[in-house]
Image (cartoon, rainbow, N blue to C red):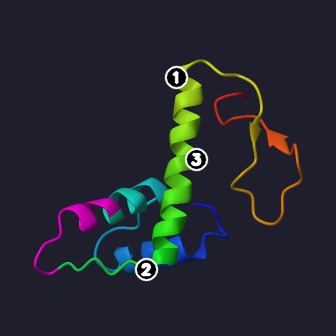
């Protein structure tokens, strides 16, 4: 999980009190499950900042998955880096070594 996603980190810590510690994907999936299929004991108590960070991370993973599906091997924008980015700041995708 990106360290600068503090709100999503807070969700991770809250969820860890009820079950084992989750990775970033597990946190996003659990948030979606709670919102889509709430139980009597579960409330949808995620704030807008937590949803925003979860959405940014999920959208980034979707873009990477689509690029990997079509066999893309070039550079991608470093959109999830902490701090300001410069125009044209690129990095290799995770599947390119």
Which residue is found at the position 14% from the left and 81% from the top? 41
**Relative to 74, residue 80 above or below:** below
- Residue 12, position as x, y percentages in the image: 44, 72
| Nearest-to-viewer mark from 2 and 1 | 2
Instruction: Provide the secondary structure element on which disc 1 rests.
Output: helix
The residue positioned farthest toward the left in the image shown: 40
Residue assigned mark 3? 60
Q: Residues within 10 Å of mark 2 (few under 14, many from 20)?
A: few
Name which of mark 2 and mark 1 comes first in the sequence: 2
Name which of mark 3 and mark 2 comes first in the sequence: 2
Q: Which disc, if any, is residue 69?
A: 1
Circle 2/circle 1 CB separation < 8 Å: no
- Residue 40, position as x, y percentages in the image: 10, 79
Q: Residues within 10 Å of mark 1 (few under 14, many from 20)?
A: few
Q: Nearer the viewer, residue 96 or 60?
A: 60
Q: Residues within 10 Å of mark 3 (few under 14, many from 20)?
A: few
Q: Within the image, what quadrant is residue 30 found in? A: bottom left
Instruction: Provide the secondary structure element on which disc 3 rests.
Output: helix
Q: CA distance from mark 1 to mark 3?
A: 14 Å
Which residue is found at the position 66% from the left and 36% from the top? 94
Residue assigned mark 2? 47
For the C terminus, the quadrant is top right
Is 35 colored magenta in this rendering?
yes
Q: Nearer the viewer, residue 29 or 84?
A: 84
**Relative to 59, residue 34 above or below:** below
**Relative to 46, residue 24 above or below:** above
- Residue 17, position as x, y percentages in the image: 34, 80
Q: Which residues are magenta?
A: 32-41
Left or right: 65 in relation to 92: left
- Residue 85, position as x, y percentages in the image: 84, 57
């Amino acid at each position: 999980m990106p360290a600068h996603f503090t709100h999503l980190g807070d969700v991770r810590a809250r969820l860890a009190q009820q079950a084992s510690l989750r990775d970033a994907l597990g946190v996003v999936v659990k948030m979606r499950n709670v919102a889509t299929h709430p139980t009597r004991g579960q409330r949808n108590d995620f704030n807008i900042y937590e949803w925003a960070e979860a959405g940014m991370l999920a959208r980034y993973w979707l873009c990477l998955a689509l690029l990997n599906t079509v066999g893309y091997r070039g550079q991608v924008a470093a959109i999830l880096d902490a701090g300001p980015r410069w125009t044209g700041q690129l990095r290799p995708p995770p599947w390119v070594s």
